[in-house]
Image (cartoon, rainbow, N blue to C red):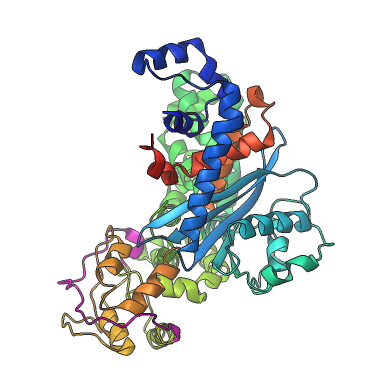
Amino acid sequence: MDKLLLRFIAGSLQPLSGVEDANFEALLNKAQPSYSSPSRKELSSKLLPSQTQQLQEHLNKKSSSVGYVCVTPDLCTNRQMRSCTGITCHFNDNFQLQSTLLACTRFKGSHTAQKIHATFTEIITSFNLQTKILTIVTDSGTNVLKALVTLPGVDDANTNQDSEGEEEDDTFHIPDNNDNLLQLLPGHVRCFVHTLQTTVKDGLQEAGPVSGVTGQASRLASHVRHSALPSDIVQVSADLGTKMQRDGTPVTRCFANLLNIDPAKLHQLNCPVKITKYELNLIKRVTDILTPSEVATLECQGENVVTSSKAIPCIRGLKAELEQPSQTHESKVITTLKSSIKKTLKIYEDKAMFQLASLLDPRFNMDWCSPQQVMFITSLLKSKVHDIKSTATEEKGSLQENKEAPTKKCRLFRFMTPSASTSSSLCTLTSTLSQVQSYLSQPTTEDDSDPLLFWEQNQSPLPQLAILALRYLCIPPSSAPVETLFSLAGKVFRPERCTMIDVRFEELMFIKCNQHLANYTLHDK
């Protein structure tokens, strides 16, 4: 019962004082008369630390059994000016994607790259992940990037581009005692979703009249949020105002909400900014153009599902959508978006980790490749397979047969056509080269199928490919997991809980975000 109580307190972010509330005690006495609930002091000084330690040990055990992990670190300051840093960890555990919290800790003092670097290093070493990190995914916060790019092996050619966040710090030097760790840390990838949203925003700003309409809609939203309006208008407009504060794809949601407001009610807003009928029509056309970018954002932000394989197909799907004949009349918008996507998103198309992830996803296989790329991508996969030294004798087996390639349901993926090498013939597999050829000859699976289930079912005939799939399909192309973490942290740091000590905050966050690891203890007596 104590563990279930902890699950309730941490899972719903309840104040610890709730266990001493008379109404809560009455409820427990009615539900379980024989149970004596712990006091607030016992909960904070004994039960929370004990459960946190159990979860940390269990996470350590899990992470020690996997070959590769990906992490998403970040730093955030809330409205109460309280800063915290967090790192989430992602890996494949027995063909199941796992997302866990390594730590969410208070961060005090200046946000220098040196301090951020020291914090990340301490967390990584506490879980013995020095040699296992395949990729680090972050947004474009300046000092977070500087803390990472000083690590050997972190390759980011665009580090000097404009970035958001903390004040820059040019005085960072690598601590001498971290040399061993720094030689082992991996490459860095910027959040694909954040980059996509920035790309769309930049494209709109260069699109002449469209950028002006976007600004007017933003000012209208700001006016609405600070006006006393009838409740039926306020509800729609509040959503409009909230979503306009973000970049990129949410602009389409803002526009959609704006278009859903009755034109007659727009005149009731008494706003200095008036949107004409022509401008509303322009907003509608721009919304149609930007909708695919919203689809791409949603496709690449799933939780505990494979998303790394979708980055390149989404980019190519966006390009294909902009080539549709129905879009040619919006020449200025289309031209600027094409240029922005080509310039900014090319780094993802050129990264081997995303190429391999797309290739090893049976939903895509080779269908996303251009004819000029087929030979290069096939050679890349063969070289990776050749590098793997199998620790066990290969088993003979046959691939599970897929009758034919299904039609793609997602509009972004309809540009794909079945690979010319697709064949229904199956063969017994023994050599690594025959594994590659036999996999590439398979038709793709359904859009909503689980690629990890495919590899679990075919790990016997395709052992080396299955190892590669587990490695590259665990990469999150977005930093959304750690950003969600900070949203939760903001709920903990409510004004009425301002006296909470740092250790208690860190324990609550760790239990809250790793509850799925606690399932193994829920039935313990």
Instruction: Judge whether residue 271 can be spotted in this image.
Output: no
Q: In this view, does 36 lie to the left or right of 42?
A: left
Number of marks: 0
Q: Where is residue 229 in the image (x, y as percent from the top left)?
A: 53, 20
> Quarter holding the C terminus?
top left
The answer to whether any part of residue 154 appears in the image is: yes
Farthest-out residue, right: 171
In this view of the protein, which residue sits in the foreground, 424 or 330? 424
Q: In the figure, residue 205 lies in which quadrant? A: bottom right
> In this rendering, would 133 be left or right of 461?
right
Q: Is residue 357 shown above or below 272?
A: below
Residue 397 rendering spot, x and y as whole percentages: 20, 79
Residue closer to the observer: 118 or 469: 118
**Residue 396 belongs to the span the image colors magenta:** yes
Name the residue located 48 percent from the left edge and 51 percent from the top edge: 58
Residue 55 percent location from the top left of the image: 50, 46
Query: Mostly what secondary structure, the magenta segment?
Result: loop
Check the picture and name the quadrant holding the N terminus: top left
Magenta stretch encompasses residue 73 = no
Residue at 64 percent across and 22 percent down: it is 496
Q: Vertically, is 49 above or below 282?
A: above
- Residue, x 70% and y 54% (percent of image)? 119
Per the rendered image, the range of residues in magenta is 387-414
Viewer-nearest residue: 17 or 337: 17
When asked about the image quadrant of residue 380, the answer is bottom left
* Residue 201 horizontal side relative to residue 287, left or right: right
Side of 197 where 396 appears, left or right = left
Where is residue 180? Give x, y as percent: 70, 71
Q: Which of 143 and 22 is in front in this view?
A: 22
| Residue 244 picture quarter | top right
Q: Is residue 431 above or below residue 139?
A: below
